[in-house]
Amino acid sequence: MQLHHFDELPRRLAHAVCILRFGAPVGVDAVRALTEHLASANVLEEVMAALDPRAGTCFVAGTWVPRTEEAHAAAIEQLRGLGERGVEAAWFFATGTTIDAIAAEGVDHAEHDDHAEHDQEAAFWRYGEPPGVAEVPFELEGFPEILEEFDGDDFGIALKLAAPGRPGEAVVLRALQQVWIGAYVDRRVDDQAFRNSGVAFDPVARAAILWVDEFAPPATVAQMVHHLLWIAAAIHQIVPVAHARFTGATMEQKYGEAMGLEGPPSVLAGNPLRSLLDDEAATAAWLASQTLWSSRELATMFVEAGTDLDPDDADDGARAAARFDRAAAIDPSNVEAAPYAQVALVRSGRVEQALQRAAGAAPEIRAHTIALVAEHAAGHMREALSLLDAAAVEAGPEEQTTELLVAIAAHVPDELPRVLAMLPARGDLAAHIFNATARCEDALLRLAMLEYVIDLPEPEAGPHREAFTYAHNNACILAHQLGDFGRAAALADIAQQYAEENPYIFHGAACAYVAVGRYEDALRQVERAVARDYDHLDKLEVDDDLGDLRRDPGFIAAFAAHRERMAHTEPVRHIGDAEFAELVLAADLPVLVDFTATWCGPCQRQAPILDRLAHGAAGRFRVVKVDIDENPELAEQYDATSVPTLVVFRDGREIGRRVGLSQRSELEGLLGVSKADLN
């Protein structure tokens, strides 16, 4: 059996990988017997194998266990005996060094973004710089450009494996990916030099990408790039590589399984066509002679080359459309070619051609084309809307609805009723339609869209629910502004069921009721707004649209009671370990504790909700905040690992909690306080 690089294996590091190759594919029983034997002999652990039930595997990899010279010698004897089990070769790899995160602590690496301070950065390797190469024995794209264009947020290398393949070769990729990224892990510290890393393998194309994101080790760009090339060259020794390129990974390649995608993600490990496309003869010759790349990959190359061009330039747009068309001809199943071609046509001014193509196309392409025209060529909206039917509306993503309605309102307003009638009655459209009203100048059209939102099924909690309640309020206000007071009052009646969620409704409804002489109903709205600590009570108290209602004794009394209550309000306090026992555990009233952090966006949105809640407490409960960064022991003690975490204590013990941004009504329920208590 052949041994490769054993003599080069560093003895001082704990981690090295051994990759074994069988002369012929073996099945699960043979792999299990081999791994059990090697584990019991203290040769390999953490063994990896990728077994195809039909094809078996040719590769097994594992962590090399021996740590002493004697153990190394004994293990090698064990390996030499594996020839009888069908193993024909073994490879050994170890980076031989690791990042020293402790030595790098406190160093401002932002000062060295260009990584020119090579000697200083090299000091952060515990056993010298990692191995690296600047040349590889296969075609490589993006080098040496990567040295200038390095992006640590999304760094990686894609590899196109040469034919023929052997079953289980993904094991080689995963094993060497661990060797690569392991060099940047310092287990003595919690914060590592990257967020995530992995390898995605496309078995159909026999292409893979080794990737890392948010990669910021204390190393030079040259060290990181050359080290990854060394890893790629190591893979090539075992599984020959035909072509490679430096590239970041897509979300599907990184997290496809977690995203629920079926099957492995596709990987394009290079684009030789890019340098040939300006020469048709050279392109045709290469396409006729090449056997490495599949039609799927070739089509992707044409799409990628098309996106290199500027779609807003007339000449580039025409060339881009031609490349996308060629991709569709090579691989009709390519889902990007046709939509990209429409982008190129519309944005380069060939709108009529795009509309002609879309006329006989699938609903998805028609919806896509209409959206493109709405965004880039709104003067053609009337012609584009001839493509619109219920199927096209349903096929388009909800996010396009806003732009579509804005363009229609601006350019073909008479079409708005027809288009609204085509929209599906779904609550998850509420925010998109509501957002369109903010950009529509015509008040009657805005009101039509708001009334459409009101008629949608009630959305669940979230942005669509929020837009839904605001649509009720805004429709009432807009009808009042238009002088249609009866319509405004009717809209106010409809909105009442959502007023507790959105106290702005109280204000708009009060004005609407005054306009039609329903003073008692208007006063009730004011009283409810005061009880709920409506954000704009100061404006409500002096609103001229309330007319004589402002002189009503009940109106005056409501605001007087509010000011009295506010005089006894305990504001939200920031506390720490020293105050927690007294103000929370020993309190004689319920206490809501907001475990928060200054860097947390949802916490910032939670703050005004807590302020309004505290304003209505009037001695019935207390609201306090604990910063988890300043008080880590409290956060750990009460399991506040996510922020915001809101915990209610009564008599020194926890009685309820919520994690995440919470609305006032939810927190009142947590506190066990009824709305009547707060009135």
Image (cartoon, rainbow, N blue to C red):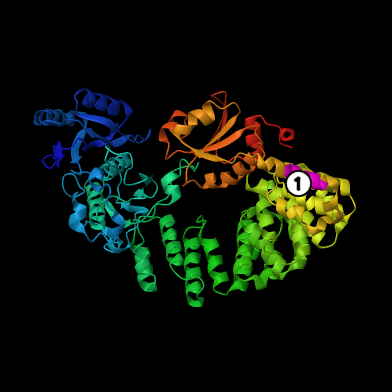
Quadrant of the rendered image containing residue 137:
bottom left
Residue 560 on the magenta segment: yes
Per the image, the residue denoted by label 1 is 559
> Is residue 466 left or right of 105 when viewed as pictured?
right
- Is 375 above or below relative to 123? below
In the displayed structure, 284 sits above or below 600; it is below
The one nearer the camera, 371 or 30, is 371
Number of marks in picture: 1
Point out the image quarter for the C terminus. Answer: top right
Q: Secondary structure at mark 1?
A: helix
Expressed as whole percent of the image width and height from the top left, the position of residue 350 reads 58, 74
Residue displayed at 89% across by 54% down? 516
The image quadrant of residue 438 is bottom right
- Outermost residue on the right side: it is 517
* Side of 161 relative to 126 (left or right): right
Please tell me whether the stretch drawn in magenta is mainly helix, strand or loop: helix
Quarter occupied by the N terminus: top left
Give the residue displayed 9% in from the left and 28% down from the top: 70
- Residue span colored magenta: 555-562
Q: What residue is at 73 percent from the left and 69 percent from the top?
A: 412
Q: Residues within 10 Å of mark 1 (few under 14, many from 20)?
A: some
Answer with left or right where residue 223 lies relative to residue 347: left
Measuring 22% from the left and 43% from the top, which residue is drawn there? 98
Q: Amino acid at mark 1?
A: Phe
Q: Is residue 321 magenta?
A: no
Q: For this rendering, which residue is in front, 211 or 100?
A: 100
Residue 342 position, x and y percent, is 56, 66
On the image, the x and y values in percent for residue 294 come to 40, 55
Instruction: Residue 430 in the image: state x and y as whole percent.
Output: 68, 51
**71 or 261: nearer the viewer:** 71
Looking at the image, which is closer to me, 127 or 134?
127
Q: Is residue 454 visible?
A: no
